[in-house]
């Protein structure tokens, strides 16, 4: 698979997920939803254009990796699905009016969180050529510690960005019920971060020293 083919496949799959909010909402003229979808698609395109060339193929083929950690074969799909669950709930909320509408200022703040979260995730992907979609030690690609850019702030900035974006979805889409899905996202993210961090400390040379320099996993000053 060429770099262009792999990038197109990833962008196409990434576009299908956010667009699913509209069938659940039962309408296509939802301006704020289009703003959220645009932010997600643009971030996906930019990250794939700027990422290390080998990373695109890695992310496109990593589901076939033999050394993926067994627990991540469950957590990785769960982490991919939970943001989609947020969009589904928000779409149904828009259709059936389960939640009272939020103030426009809160919706704009939510959109800002979505953009910020995806910007952090893009920064992490561009900085780290080993930003695989599955947890594995990439010995086939010369896997080593990355400690620059956002990795000098937290050890798992991609997860941090994802959490920030997921927190913004319910606000931007004016759906209090979608915060239930945020709780699921948080649980899955914390569990995966803990297990991934333990794996890297045990198996990736230099990671223990890196963890002493960059003390926090997800949130500076918290954890």
Image (cartoon, grey):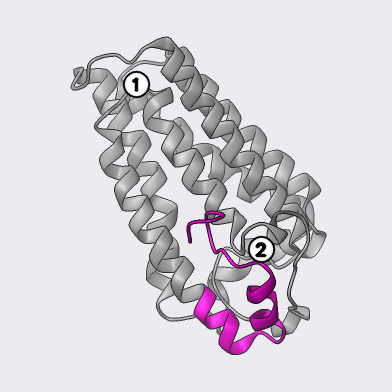
Please give the range of residues in magenta: 197-223
The residue under label 2 is 131
The residue under label 1 is 174
How many residues crowd mark 2 within 10 Å: few (<14), some (14–19), many (20+)?
A: some
Q: Residue furthest front?
A: 221
Residue 20, visible in the rendered structure: no
Residue 168, visible in the rendered structure: yes
Q: Return the x and y of residue 139 as percentages of the image width and height.
A: 71, 85
Q: Earlier in the sequence, mark 1 or mark 2?
A: 2
Between marks 1 and 2 in the image, the one whose residue lies nearer the viewer: 1
Occupied quadrant, residue 97:
top left
Q: Is residue 15 above or below residue 67?
A: above
Q: Camera-side residue: 72 or 196? A: 196
Quarter of the image with the N terminus is bottom right
Spatial separation of the CA atoms under disc 1 and disc 2: 32 Å
Q: Is residue 96 magenta?
A: no
Q: Is residue 220 magenta?
A: yes
Query: Cβ–Cβ below 8 Å for labels 1 and 2?
Result: no
| SS class, disc 1 | loop
């Amino acid at each position: 698979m060429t770099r262009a083919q792999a990038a197109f496949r990833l962008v196409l799959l990434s576009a299908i997920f956010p667009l699913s909010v509209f069938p659940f909402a039962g309408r296509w003229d939802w301006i704020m939803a289009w703003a959220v979808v645009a932010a997600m698609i643009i971030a996906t395109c930019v990250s794939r254009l700027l990422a290390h060339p080998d990373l695109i193929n890695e992310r496109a083929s990593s589901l076939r990796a033999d050394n993926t950690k067994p627990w991540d074969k469950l957590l990785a799909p769960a982490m991919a699905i939970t943001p989609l669950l947020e969009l589904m709930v928000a779409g149904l909320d828009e259709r059936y009016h389960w939640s009272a509408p939020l103030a426009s200022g809160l919706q704009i703040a939510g959109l800002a969180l979505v953009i910020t979260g995806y910007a952090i995730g893009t920064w992490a992907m561009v900085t780290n050529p080993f930003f695989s979609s599955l947890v594995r030690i990439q010995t086939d690609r010369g896997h080593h510690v990355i400690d620059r850019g956002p990795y000098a702030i937290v050890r798992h900035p991609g997860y941090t960005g994802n959490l920030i974006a997921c927190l913004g979805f319910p606000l931007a889409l004016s759906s209090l019920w979608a915060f239930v899905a945020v709780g699921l996202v948080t649980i899955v993210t914390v569990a995966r971060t803990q297990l991934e961090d333990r794996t890297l400390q045990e198996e990736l040379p230099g990671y223990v020293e890196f963890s002493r320099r960059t003390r926090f996993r997800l949130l500076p000053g918290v954890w």
